Amino acid sequence: MSNLKQVTDATFEQDVLKSDKPVLVDFWAEWCAPCRAVGPVLEQIALENGEKIEIVKLNVDDNPETAAKYHITSIPAMKVYRGGEVVKSVIGAKPKPALESELAAFLA
């Protein structure tokens, strides 16, 4: 099981939209193999950059309201929120260097 914080439809606003720092939300599902593959990569990035960006997970099967609101049509989908707005989207599982490159602006 992931060490990353799980957010839900009920906690999304408080945990993500009202956060003081950028938050990457990993939209995933239990049955999604690429989602399971990217999970450990996100955990590593979270461990190494926890003071700069928070990384949380949202299960799309358990939280359809938030997934629908942000038009999540394929997973894994990762969205970075800052100040309540989506400022970056990354679709699909990627290796750590590629993800770090995509997130460079938030990890600097």
Image (spheres, rainbow, N blue to C red):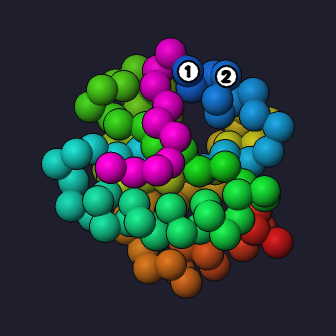
Is the magenta region chiefly helix, strand or loop?
loop
Residue 13 image point, x, y percent:
63, 22
Residue 26 disc label: none
The percent position of residue 56, horizontal first and vertical second, equals: 54, 44
Task: Identify the residue position indicated by label 2 in the image.
Answer: 14
Tell which residue pokes out farthest to the top in this image: 10
Number of marks in picture: 2
Q: Does the magenta stretch include residue 9?
A: yes
Q: How far apart are marks 2 and 1 (CA)?
A: 6 Å
At x 71%, y 65%, the residue is: 49
| Residue type at tag 1 | Thr
Task: Name the quadrant containing residue 45.
Answer: bottom right
Amino acid found under the numbered disc labelled 2: Gln
Q: Residue at x 32, y 49 (%)?
A: 1
Placement of the C terminus among the 4 image quadrants: bottom right
Q: Residue at x 50, y 48 (%)?
A: 4
Residue identifier under label 1 = 11
**Mark 1 residue crowding within 10 angstroms, few (<14) / some (14–19) / many (20+):** few
Q: What element carries label 1?
A: loop
Assess disc 2: are there few (<14), some (14-19) or many (≥20) residues with their C-alpha within 10 Å of its C-alpha: few
- Residue 96 vs 33, above or below: the answer is below
Q: Residue 94: x, y in percent?
A: 42, 74
User: Could you tell me residue 81's position as x and y percent?
Assistant: 68, 43
Labelled pair 2, 1 in contact (Cβ < 8 Å): yes
Q: Nearer the viewer, residue 45 or 34?
A: 45
Q: Which residue lies furthest to the bottom in this view?
A: 97
In magenta, the rendered stretch is: 1-10
Given residues 36 and 86, the one toward you in this image is 36
The one of 50 and 15 positioned closer to us in this rendering: 50
Is 40 positioned to the left or the right of 50 in the image?
A: left
